[in-house]
Amino acid sequence: MSEENKGFFKGLWGKLTGAEAAPELVADEPSKSVVQEEPVSAPVSGVAATAAIQEPQPKPSLFQRLKQGLARTHEGLVARIDTLLLGKKEIDADTLEELEEILITADIGVPTTVELIRTLEVKLGRNELQDGAALKKALQEEIRSRLEKYSAPLEVTAVKPFVIMVIGVNGVGKTTTIGKLASRYVADGKKVLLAAGDTFRAAAAEQLEEWGRRAGVDVIRHQAGADPSAVVFDGCKAAVARGCDILIVDTAGRLHTKVNLMEEMKKIRRVMGREVAGAPHETLLVLDAATGQNAMSQARLFKEAAEVSGVVLTKLDGTAKGGIVVAVSNEFQLPIRFIGIGEQAEDLRPFEPEQFVSALFD
């Protein structure tokens, strides 16, 4: 049958049945399109399904990060206190004696612990400590008051450049602390310069340069073994010439003898003071919180030798003996400027006694 007849009968059949004739598909006519059903997606299963429905986790707040960083100290101090006081309806001398042992083993130190216990004994004598909850609250308040007594944030004044000398023995996180400080001040819009004054430790200058690269700041350095005072001289000259807001100076962490340390620090300070009026404006002592009583010994020596004006306590997230924070501040009457609770730059936190004690005891 001819194509014309086929078309005639197809049209006639459509009229008789009331059906529309199906359109012919013509490959070379793009204006005529075919509506296709959307393919049914295969069900997502397994790990892919979990990933598809998972929502991004909210970033921990600064207070939560602080609590996480102090978790080990909480377990080593507060959790043991809670165990001691669990169900205590009455506080007696034996309870205070056991509490004293917990405080000392948490590196709060003997002198500060004795002060705390004597204060609590006075309160007990006045019938102010009726039960375990009252004792814990009183201890928390006493620790807070001692930290607040010497607390003061590091204020960068209008002096340009504001010179910060950073001191401390090798291995405490001194260079890392300088890098984190640089990142903090750059984020605040300050122009920062670093001086690699630790010319004796192998690769110290290279490590500082890497931190400088991360923070986007320049580093003044000399060859290994050079005179630290010469590096400091060049650092001060460069900071003045470049109009820097802050100059942070690394120093050697040698403790061969007390005399050598004192003489070297005096020389560096003389050079700073000659090039920048009033420098150094801040002398930060970096201590590793995990070293406990060694940190106390270092604080004692450096305070005598280097006119320390503030303390940075690093690696608090790696120790169960964070009571060293209380001991250093109380016994040496020094402000804790910063604490380190992790590896990230933002984990170097300005020290706030109220927040610290709340995070520790909560």
Image (cartoon, rainbow, N blue to C red):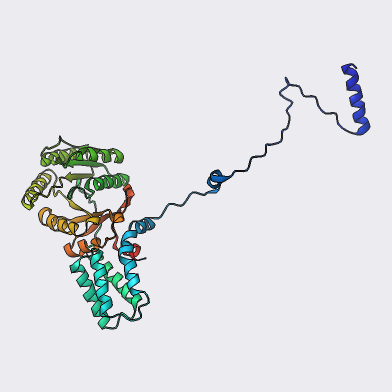
At a point 14% along the width and 50% down the height, the residue shown is 278
Residue 263 in view, yes or no: yes
Image height of 25 relative to 354, above or below: above
**Which residue is more in the foreground, 336 or 299?**
299
Name the residue furthest right: 16
**Which residue is more in the foreground, 216 or 22?**
22
Q: How far from the left and from the top, in percent, is residue 326? A: 24, 63
Q: How far from the left and from the top, in percent, is residue 48? A: 55, 43
Q: Quadrant of the C terminus?
A: bottom left
Residue 154 in view, yes or no: no
At a point 67% along the width and 36% down the height, the residue shown is 39
Count of labels in the image:
0
Q: Is residue 9 left or right of residue 269?
A: right
Residue 313 figure quarter: bottom left
Residue 208 figure quarter: top left
Image height of 24 relative to 116, above or below: above
Q: Quadrant of the N terminus?
A: top right
At a point 51% along the width and 49% down the height, the residue shown is 55
Q: How far from the left and from the top, in percent, is residue 223? A: 15, 34
Q: How far from the left and from the top, in percent, is residue 88? A: 35, 78
